[in-house]
């Protein structure tokens, strides 16, 4: 009887501890997500940092050069896109222009413009925007802090990664150390290749679609093209959103422009799937399309929109662990596309 009570007490303690840890992790889910994002960025940067350090540049300078290049690229994009985008936003919000076009239009175009006019009529007036403006400022500050935290954590992890790997493997049985180290390197390589490839795809798709929309005559072409590039980061759902927006904007001009916009998105998507991704990104994460769709949907349902950005990296990590632990695959035998860096840099 006493032994049964003791076992029940221990089981209760274990269950309680698991619940407490689970609740703590749930409360800290944003912090964990930011740390994981830092880990992903570090994985993407590390081959480049290693390549520069082998050429005699200090690691701190190599990391700063990556951040400087990223800041320069963002500044260039803002300089090229923002002025034109502001003009197009102002034109889009010109209620008199929309009302005039709606009166002169028929069919689908008139329905879209009338619906847009109603939406604009429902927007709050200037004196009602004070509280939302304060909230927006607070959110912007929180986003800035989050970005700074991620970039700082990524830099720190690049410094400490090798030491952390040695520490973890040193406490494991000797026969398992190589497998753990190779698994860690494989996850690092997969995540880094995925992020670098996605960055290239975002810039390429955004640029190509913006030019095509301009040629076709889609209104607000630079806004829609930039949006199409950004939502590339959201698997499956992102391209569908971009296509729907482009077709809708094109229909406000004419059915022909709407159809042409849809064809442009479809052609770019097909080229991306069958030509660009196999050559640029390859099978970096080793996930089937069905598993990608499931991961994205499950992340959105369980954790909200922000988690969608991390769905594929998380699925890639879990898939790698299943391959190694459950299926007993050797992580050293798996090839991962290096994306932008030769194999010796990606494996350093």
Image: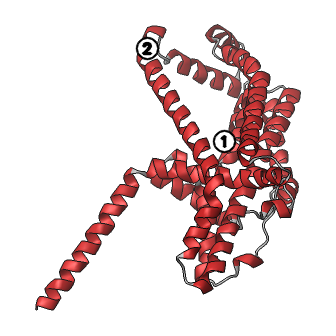
Residue at x-position 49% and y-position 48%: 304
The residue tagged 2 is 130
Q: Is residue 244 left or right of residue 3?
A: right
Residue at x-position 70% and y-position 81%: 330
x and y percentages locating residue 106 in the rendered image: 71, 21
Q: Which disc number belongs to residue 241?
A: 1
Distance between the alpha carbons at the discs numbered 1 and 2: 31 Å
- Tell me how the rendering is colored: secondary structure
Task: Say what secondary structure mark 2 lies in.
Answer: helix
x and y percentages locating residue 216 in the rendered image: 86, 29
Q: Assess disc 2: are there few (<14), some (14-19) or many (≥20) residues with their C-alpha within 10 Å of its C-alpha.
A: few
Q: Assess disc 1: are there few (<14), some (14-19) or many (≥20) residues with their C-alpha within 10 Å of its C-alpha.
A: some
x and y percentages locating residue 248 in the rendered image: 70, 32
- Give the quarter of the figure containing the C terminus: bottom right
Q: Which disc number belongs to residue 269?
A: none
Seen in the picture, residue 31 relative to 188 is either above or below; the reply is: above
Q: Residue furthest left?
A: 1
Looking at the image, do the residues carrying marks 1 and 2 touch, with CB atoms under 8 Å apart? no
x and y percentages locating residue 97 in the rendered image: 68, 10
Q: Is residue 55 visible?
A: yes
Task: Say what secondary structure mark 1 lies in.
Answer: helix
Of the residues tagged 1 and 2, which is closer to the observer? Answer: 2
Q: Nearer the viewer, residue 104 or 22?
A: 22
Q: Is residue 4 left or right of residue 17?
A: left
Residue at x-position 49% and y-position 23%: 137
Seen in the picture, residue 217 relative to 153 is either above or below; the reply is: above
Dot 1 or dot 2: first in sequence order is 2
Q: Nearer the viewer, residue 337 or 223?
A: 337
Q: Nearer the viewer, residue 331 or 133?
A: 331
Seen in the picture, residue 197 relative to 220 is either above or below; the reply is: below
Q: Is residue 240 visible?
A: no
- Give the quarter of the figure containing the N terminus: bottom left
């Amino acid at each position: 009887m006493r032994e049964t009570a003791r076992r029940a007490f221990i089981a209760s303690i274990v269950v309680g501890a698991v619940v407490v840890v689970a609740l703590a992790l749930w409360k800290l889910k944003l912090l964990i997500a930011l740390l994981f994002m830092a880990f992903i960025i570090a994985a993407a940067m590390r081959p480049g940092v290693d390549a520069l350090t082998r050429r005699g540049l200090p690691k701190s300078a190599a990391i700063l050069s990556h951040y400087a290049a990223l800041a320069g690229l963002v500044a260039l994009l803002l300089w090229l896109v923002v002025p034109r985008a502001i003009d197009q936003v102002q034109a889009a919000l010109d209620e008199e222009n929309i009302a005039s076009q709606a009166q002169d239009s028929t069919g689908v175009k008139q329905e879209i413009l009338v619906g847009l006019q109603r939406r604009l009529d429902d927007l709050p007036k200037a004196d009602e925007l004070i509280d939302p403006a304060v909230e927006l400022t607070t959110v912007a500050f929180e986003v800035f802090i989050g970005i700074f935290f991620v970039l700082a954590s990524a830099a720190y992890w690049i410094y400490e990664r090798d030491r952390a790997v040695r520490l973890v493997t040193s406490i494991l049985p000797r026969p398992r150390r190589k497998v753990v180290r190779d698994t860690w390197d494989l996850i690092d390589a997969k995540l880094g290749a995925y992020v670098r490839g996605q960055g290239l795809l975002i810039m390429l798709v955004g640029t190509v679609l913006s030019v095509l929309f301009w040629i076709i005559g889609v209104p607000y072409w630079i806004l829609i093209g930039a949006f199409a590039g950004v939502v590339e980061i959201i698997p499956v759902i992102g391209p569908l959103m971009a296509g729907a927006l482009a077709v809708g904007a094109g229909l406000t001009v004419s059915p022909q422009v709407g159809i042409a916009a849809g064809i442009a998105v479809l052609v770019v998507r097909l080229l991306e799937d069958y030509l660009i991704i196999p050559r640029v990104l390859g099978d970096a994460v080793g996930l089937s399309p069905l598993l990608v769709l499931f991961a994205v949907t499950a992340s959105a349902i369980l954790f909200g929109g922000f988690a969608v950005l991390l769905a594929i990296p998380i699925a890639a990590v879990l898939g790698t662990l299943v391959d190694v632990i459950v299926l007993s695959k050797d992580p050293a035998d798996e090839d991962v596309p290096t994306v932008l860096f030769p194999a010796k840099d990606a494996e350093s």
